[in-house]
Image: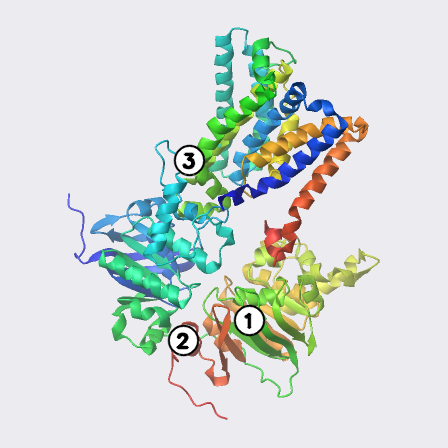
Amino acid sequence: MTPETTGAGSLLEVRAITKSFGGVQALNAADFACDRGEIHALLGANGAGKSTLVKILSGVMAPDSGTIFFDGQEVTFSSPADAGAQGVATVFQELSLFAHLTVAENIFIGHEPLTRLGQVSGRRMRAAARALFDRLGIDHLNPDAMLSDLSLADRQLVEIFKALSRDPRLLILDEGTSALGRTEVERLFALLRKLKAGGTSVVFISHRMAETREFVDRMSVFRNGALVGTVAAAECSDEEIVEMMLGQRVEKSFPERSPLPAGAPVLLEVERMSDGSRLRDISLRLRGGEVLGIAGLEGQGQGELLLALFGAYRRLSGRVLLHGKPAKLSKPWIAKRAGIALIPEDRKTEGLVLPMSVRENVSMATLPAYGRFGFVSLKRERQFVAQMIARLEIKVGGMEQPARSLSGGNQQKLVLAKWLATGAEVFLFYDPTRGIDVGTKRAFYELIAGLARAGKGVIVYTTETSELAGLCHRVLVMDDGQMVRSLEGRDITEPKILAASFGLGDGAKPEKVPA
Amino acid sequence: MIFRRYNTSVLAVVALGLLLIYYYIRQPLILSPFGAKILANQGTTLALAALAQLVVVLTGGVDLSVGAVVSLSNCIAATYMGSHPASVIAVCVLTLAVGAGAGLVNGVLVAYGRIQPIIVTLATLYIFSGLALMVRPQPGGLVPPFYANALTGGWGYLPYAMVALFVMLFAVWTPLMRSRLGTAIRAVGDNPGGAHMSGINVPRTLILAYVMGGVFAAAAGLYLTAQTTSGDAAIGTSYTLNSVAAVVFGGALLGGGRGVAPGPVIAAYFLSIIISVLFAAGISPFYQSVFQGGILMVVLVFGNLWTLRTRNWLTILKN
C-alpha cells in the first residue's frame, strides 16, 4: 500500500480542484502548491475563487472533484474539526467568533485547558492566552474581556490567536489583516516568520499587497476559478500582477454615458463624515445627472457609507447637505422623505417582503398617495403599479404574484420601482447586479444611465470593477473607511481602479488627461 | 471583568429585593422560619423549570415542552412512588431518566430534523401531555409524607427547598456549564456557523443541551410532587411560558449565547411570589393577572431601555 506522494518540498498540493455553486463555476480545475515553511500569498480579483479554495482547504465545503495532498498523503477534509485535527487552522474572512464569550474562551473554544475534574480551567486558559499575546508582543488585550466590547481590529487579532492556539502546520489567513494597523501587521508577520522558521507554512490572502508583499515568499494569482501562475514575490512588478489578475477581459456592453452638464446642481454633499470606526472623514459631492462609483475591496466601509447616507446610523460626525441645505439623516424614513433611496445589498430581506405580492411591494413606500383618510384606493394603486411594471419592463405573470416567485433581476427591479415611486432624487445602489443574469444586468445598466439622464444623482457601490469603469462619471476608491483616491474621465479604467483598491501603484502607464 | 457576565442578573435581583421589602412592609410575618419556607417553596418549581428553559435558550432555541415534562414527571412520581424509601428513590431516578429521554427526543429532532425548536417542542408538548394523561387520567396518587417533608420542610431559617435547589445548581448545573460542553452550548447559540467552523460538534451539543433541559424539567416535576403531594396531568401547563418569562427577565437573550443561572432563578422566585404579594396588597383576584402582566412589562421595558441607544436600528430589529 503506497499512497501517491508528492515532491518532498510541498506541504500542501492541490490538483485540479473543481467546485461550482448552482450554475457558477467558482473553481475550475485549480492547482495550488505550498512548500513547507513558506509564506505564500493568494491573489485575485473579487470572485477569482480564492475564498472558495480556502473553504475547501479548511473543511468548510467539499470540492466537486480534484485531490488534495497534505504532507505527502492524499487527504480529505470532511469538516473544520477534521481539518483542524490534521493540522490546518484558518483565520476566516467572516469572523467565526462569539460575541458573548470572553477573549480567552474565544481563543480556546473546543480545546480549552481542563482541570483534573474536567472543568474548564479559567486560570490556565488565561495564562495560555497571555503567553500567546506575548509571542506577538500584544499587551493591550485582556483575556477576560467580553468579545463584544472589542474593536474590529482586536477581534481580528483574537481570530488570529484562535488559529495559532492550535499550533497548526498550515495556517491560512483569509483577509485576516484587513482591520489591522500597520504596526500590528508588521508584528504579525514577524511572528509568521518565526512560525515559518519552525516549519509552519502560511497561506495568506490579503488585498493590501503594498503592505504585505515584502513579507511574502511566493505569490499565486487566481483568475476565474483557476491558477494563472505562481511567482516569487521579489521578482514580479505591480504591473505584471495587475495584468495577471485581469487577464483577457470579456468586453461587456454598457449604455453610453450621458455627458455631465457643466452647470449641474450639487444634489448631495458630504463633509468629513465619520462614525468612529468604519467611516473616517468621508467627503464627497454628487451632482444631478452624475453616476458616482464607490470602489475598493469588499468591506472597506462602502456599505456603511451607503447605510449612513440612508439614515441607518446615529451619532455621525460631519455634515450632510442636500440641495445646499444642511440635512440631518438620522432615520431611514427621514432620508426617504428627503428624497434618498437605497437599493439595498440583500434584496431578499432588506429590499422586499418576499411573500407579499408584486403590487404590495411596489406600492409599499408610497401607499398614502393612492388614497384618502388612511384608506387605499385599490384602483389607483393598481394603475400606478401597472405603469411601473411597464416602465421598468418587469416580467411578471400578474401583479398579485408573490415577489418570491420572480427571478433575481426582476426582484431587483421591484425594489427600484418601489423607490422610483417615492420621487427620490438621490439613488444609492448597493451591489445591484450581484447574482442576476447578464441580460438583466444590461437592463439595469440602462436604468442607472436613465436615472442619470433624468437628472437624478446616483451612487453605485459594486464589486464588479468593469461596471464602475463602464457606468460612472467619477469613481471614489475606499480603503479602511477612507477615500483614498478619486478617478475621473479617462482615468476610470479597470486596471487603475484595481490598482488603487489593492494599494498598488498605477496599474497602467500614466496617461495624459487632456486639459 | 468576569463578573460582567453576571450583570444581566442585576435587574432580577433588584426587582426581587424591592418586591420582598414591599412584602415585608405589608406582611412582617414573612421574616420568620415559616415565612422563609413558604417563600422558598413557592418559587422552587419554577426556578428549576427556568433552568430547564435557560439551557435550551442558550443554544438559541426555546422549549415549549417544559410544562408538559413537568406534568409527566409529576404524574409518574405520584403514581408509582409507593411508600418505601427504596421505591421512592428508584422512581425519582426513573422520573429524571424519563425527563432526559424527553429532552433527547427534542434534541434529536432539532439537531437532525432541522426543524425549528419552537415547532418541535410544540409537537412534543402535546405528546408528553398525552403521556401524562395516560399515566394518570384523574388527579390523585400517593406521595409519602417523608418525601414531601424532605423537600418542602425547613430547619430554622433554612428551607429544604433551598438545599434542593442549591444541590441542583452546584452539583449539576455549574459543573456542566463549566465543562467544555457549557462553553460549546453558549457558542452554538451565539454563532452556530462560527461554532461549526471552530470544530464544535453542533448537533451533539444541541442534543445534550435538550437532554439537560429535560432532566431539569423532570426535577421541577419532582419538586412539584412534594409540594402538592398528588399527581395531575394538567398541572405543568403554566410553567412553559412562565419559564420563558423568567429566563428573559433573568437577562438571557432569546436569540441565544447569553445567560447565566442566577438571573432566571431569581426571576422565577419573583414571578412566583408576586401573586402572594398582590394578594397581601389587597388587590382583587380579578385584577391580579393584569397587575402581574403589567409589572412584568414595566420591569422588562426598564431593563431594555439601554438597547435603544444603539447606533443602528437594523441591529436591534434583526435581533
> How far apart, in angstroms, are the residues tagged by discs 2 and 1?
19 Å
- Foreground mark, 2 or 3, reads 3
What amino acid is labelled 2 in the image? Ala
What amino acid is labelled 1 in the image? Val
* Left or right: B41 in relation to B205: right
Task: Give the image quarter of residue B20.
Answer: top right
Name the residue nearer the viewer: A429 or B319. Answer: B319
Q: Position of residue B72 (x, y in %)?
A: 58, 20
Number of residues whose C-alpha sits closer than 10 Å to that of mark 1, classed few (under 14), some (14–19) or many (20 or more):
many
* Left or right: B278 in relation to B307: right
Q: Look at the numbered disc 1 and give the secondary structure of its residue.
A: strand
- Foreground mark, 1 or 3, reads 3
What amino acid is labelled 3 in the image? Ser
Asked if B74 appears above or below A21 in the picture, the reply is above
Q: Chain of mark 3?
A: B
Residue tagged 1? A460
Q: Chain of mark 2?
A: A
Q: Look at the numbered disc 3 and give the secondary structure of its residue.
A: loop
Dots 1 and 3 on the same chain? no
Residue B257 appears in the picture as rendered: no
Residue tagged 3? B179
Name the residue nearer the viewer: A293 or A306. Answer: A306
Name the residue nearer the viewer: A127 or B84. Answer: A127
Residue tagged 2? A499
Task: Give the image quarter of residue B121.
Answer: top right
Dots 2 and 1 on the same chain? yes
